[in-house]
Each structure stands twice: as C-alpha cells, then as structure tokens.
Amino acid sequence: MVKCPMCDGPIDVEEEELDEGDILTCEECGAEIQVAGVNPLDLESAEEEDLDDEEGDLDEEDEDEDEEEWR
C-alpha cells in the first residue's frame, strides 16, 4: 500500500507496479502525485512540477521577446 505524501491517505496501488514518472491520484485529498523514484519509492506532488513547467515556458517567451527588442 502506498501513502499520499500530501495527506498520508492510502493510494490503492501496488508499489512493485509503479514506474518513475507515473501519475497517481489520491482518493482522499484529490492530489496528483508523481513517482519521482522507485527504489526507494519517492513520491512528490505532480502539481508542483506543472507550475515549474509553466514558469519555464514563460521565461522562454520573455527571452524571445527580449531578443526581438534588440533587433
């Protein structure tokens, strides 16, 4: 049995079936959890990573705009 790192609730999945990068949803709190590592099992909020990705996209867009201003 796997426990949610956000609320410590049970997630109904066998630890041996998980692969790095898998996304799980906690039935207790609704959080999306990503498998960051399998040996040992490391779970993290998938929502935090989504925010990082979005921020990275904005940074790239800002760089493109800055580059165009120099031309």
Image (tube, rainbow, N blue to C red):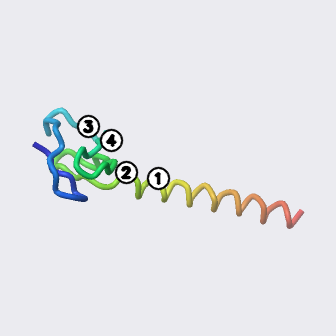
Disc 2 + disc 1, Cβ < 8 Å: yes
Q: Say what amino acid the circle numbered 3 marks.
A: Asp
Q: Which residue is mark 2?
A: 46
Residue type at mark 4 is: Ile
Q: Are marks 4 and 2 in contact (CB under 8 Å)?
A: yes
Q: Which residue is under mark 1? A: 50
Task: Residue under label 4, please give it.
Answer: 23
Residue contact between numbered discs 1 and 4, judged by CB atoms under 8 Å = no
Q: Is residue 34 above or below residue 67?
A: above
The amino acid marked with disc number 2 is Ala
- Residue 43's spot in the image, x, y percent? 25, 52
What SS does tag 1 mark? helix
Secondary element at image label 3: loop
Counting from the top left corner in percent of width and height, residue 57 is at: 61, 55
Residue assigned mark 3: 19
- For label 1, count other residues whose C-alpha is less than 10 Å away and answer few (under 14), some (14-19) or many (20+): few
- CB atoms at circles 1 and 3 under 8 Å apart? no
Among the two numbered marks 1 and 4 on one chain, the one whose residue lies closer to the N terminus: 4
Tell me which amino acid carries mark 1.
Asp
Q: Is residue 67 above or below residue 33?
A: below
Left-right relation of 52 to 66? left
